[in-house]
Image: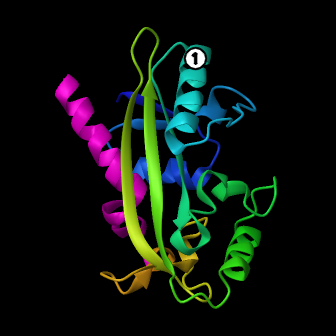
């Protein structure tokens, strides 16, 4: 079984990859490098994903996948965007991030939003390739559901009549921004074989 190294310490993201890549041995980078962290100095999801995948590929001297993803709320000018994980502070607290977002959105009636995921794949001596996925929805007034992570409990999908946090892992992988980006990655990998 071929390894796929994911340059993330986020267990939720790593589990998403495991569900979508059952035929691979998905390894979180923490299993190979202790305290791997790359400062996300880019101003786009694309730039930050590339920073992470290239740094990890160089450190491990092997193919690595990284992603940068987040939530864009249109009424807030795209916030929290690339700052989604640390929206309420540097400690990456999902509940605090949700509370800050709901407070900032207040009683705004335009609650349209999208999740964005950019996957970056880097390998020594190869050009980095990237794949983008998005999913559109609306921000709820309060949290609904127990599954998922991050902003999933407040991200409502009209066509499913549920929040992301009410979906099973398999349902989520079929509709999510990460699932869509990974599908493009899979097609690319299949084309290589």
Whether 49 is drawn above or below 58: the answer is below
Q: Is residue 20 left or right of residue 92?
A: left
Q: Is residue 186 magenta?
A: yes
Q: Nearer the viewer, residue 102 or 65?
A: 102
Residue 40 lies left or right of residue 180; in this view the side is right
> x%, y% of residue 2?
36, 27
Start-end of magenta stretch: 167-193
The answer to which of 93 and 111 lies nearer the viewer is 111
On-image quarter of the N terminus: top left
Q: Position of residue 99 (x, y in %)?
A: 73, 77
Image quadrant where residue 131 sits: top left
Residue 38 in the image: above or below residue 8:
above
Image coordinates of residue 37 in percent, x first then y, are 71, 33
Q: Label 1, on which residue?
A: 60
**Residue 8, above or below 150:** above
Q: Residue at x 59, y 31 (%)?
A: 52
Above-or-below relation of 89 to 26: below
In this view of the protein, which residue sits in the foreground, 150 or 6? 150
């Amino acid at each position: 079984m071929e390894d796929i190294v994911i340059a993330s310490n986020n267990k939720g993201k790593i589990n998403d990859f495991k569900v979508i890549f059952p035929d691979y041995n998905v390894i979180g980078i923490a299993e190979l490098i202790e305290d791997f962290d790359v400062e996300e100095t880019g101003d786009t999801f694309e730039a930050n994903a590339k920073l992470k995948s290239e740094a990890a590929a160089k450190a491990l001297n092997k193919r690595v996948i990284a992603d940068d993803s987040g939530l864009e709320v249109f009424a807030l000018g795209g916030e929290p965007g690339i700052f989604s994980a640390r929206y309420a502070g540097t400690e990456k607290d999902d509940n605090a991030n949700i509370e800050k977002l709901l407070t900032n959105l207040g009683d705004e009636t335009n609650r349209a939003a999208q999740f964005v995921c950019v996957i970056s794949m880097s390998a020594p001596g190869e050009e980095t390739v990237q794949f983008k996925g998005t999913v559109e929805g609306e921000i709820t007034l309060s949290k609904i559901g127990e599954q998922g992570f991050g902003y999933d409990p407040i991200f409502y999908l009209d066509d499913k009549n549920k929040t992301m946090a009410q979906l099973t892992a398999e349902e989520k992988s079929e509709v999510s921004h990460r699932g869509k980006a990974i599908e493009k990655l899979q097609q690319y990998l299949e084309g290589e074989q």
